[in-house]
Amino acid sequence: MSIPKENLSLKKFNTFGIDVAAREIIYLRELNQLDKISNLKDCLIIGGGSNILLTKDIDKQVIINKTKGICTVNEDEFHIELAVASGEDWHKFVMYCIQKGYGGIENMSLIPGSVGAAPMQNIGAYGREIKDVLTYVNAVNLNTKKIERFTNKACEFGYRDSIFKKSAKGKYFIADIGIRLTKKDHQINTSYGDIENWLYLNQIKTPTIQDVSNAVIAIRKNKLPNPAELGNSGSFFKNPVISASHYKNLLLKFPEIKSYPVNDEEVKVPAGWLIESLGWKGKRVGNTGAHNKQALVLVNYGNAMGYEVQQLSEDIKKSVWETYQIKLETEVNII
């Protein structure tokens, strides 16, 4: 028997716009509400819904994180440390900081999702990652309902990875995070070609954090579809890291293959290039497909079911493996 969908649809709570139902929806505005939930570990917690693909109805309580709050923890002449509630919108928080003149996260403008998801997957863009500015994560242990603090080191950050996607996965609810930003003498990062080109075209020789943010927003809007207009979850796959020897062998067969050095022994290959090279870019399969401007982004053209998007992702992974012997990993959490 299917779950009734009246007022229980999760369509507006996931950026893919997948219409599945929950058994019950709880709007979390205060942390003490968690004390009243008997089995937190059996709940699905959703923040901005920008990094999930829902493939079926959720026969459990779904907690929608609506917690808010930004406050100062420490401050001196050069730096400020802010405590930010996990339910805050990430991009709005970035805009808040830029308006205040706080630098360090401007390169991560327009990344969708909530603040709580940022450390979970170590979000990053254009040369900056959350690990570069994060001081701590306060997380509620779902078993004990007690708050535990994770230092930056304890978060075990990696490329789009953290302890919250590994040994601590499903065991914690991120309550708030600490972010340390600069108040002056900002370290402006314009090393990516797209940013440099935008600054050049706009005749900006000495960019501010606002300029960098404007550049990133313009670039992302040009490359990535707006989830409000076309359901998607941003980059669906991680950029794979392969051995240098594997890359050299591929280079002999595919001299046009793109790469970025990681270290002396490893090379990062753009997943978007791999997918596009196999003809997936702009290809539509039923109600879903790979976006026509960015092959890394899988989209919902309307009324797609989660399993359709999942099947497309599996077909793409299979073709990449068969051609390049490279295993693509999903960046999106499939539920």
Image (spheres, rainbow, N blue to C red):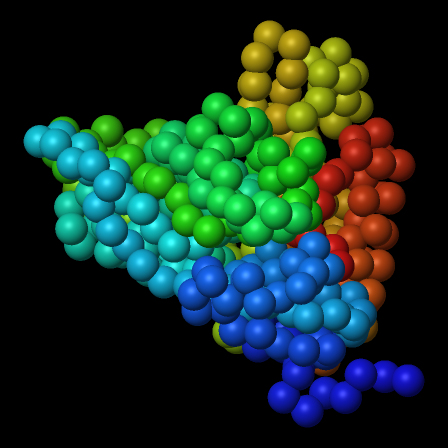
Residue 235 vs residue 181: left or right?
Answer: right
Question: Observer-nearest residue: 63 or 249?
Answer: 63
- In the picture provided, is 256 more to the left or to the right than 212? right
Residue 270: x %, y % from top left: 62, 35
Q: Quadrant of the N terminus?
A: bottom right
Of residues 22 and 104, the one drawn nearer to the viewer in this rendering: 22
Query: At 64% across and 30% down in the image, what residue appears?
Result: 269
Can residue 33 be seen here? The reply is: yes
Find the residue positioned furthest to the top.
Answer: 264
Query: Residue at 27% across / 44% down in the picture?
Result: 82
101 vs 23, nearest the viewer: 23
Judge from the rendering whether residue 41 lies leftward or rightward of residue 13; answer left or right.
Answer: right
The structure residue drawn at horizontal position 36% and vertical position 62%, both measured from the top left corner, is 68
Q: Tell me if residue 232 can be seen.
A: no
Q: Quadrant of residue 137?
A: top left
Residue at 72 percent across and 16 percent down: it is 243
Relative to 147, is 310 above or below? below
Residue 300 to residue 312: above or below:
below
Does residue 100 sit above or below 11 in this rendering? above
Q: Residue 111, position in %: x, y? A: 44, 53
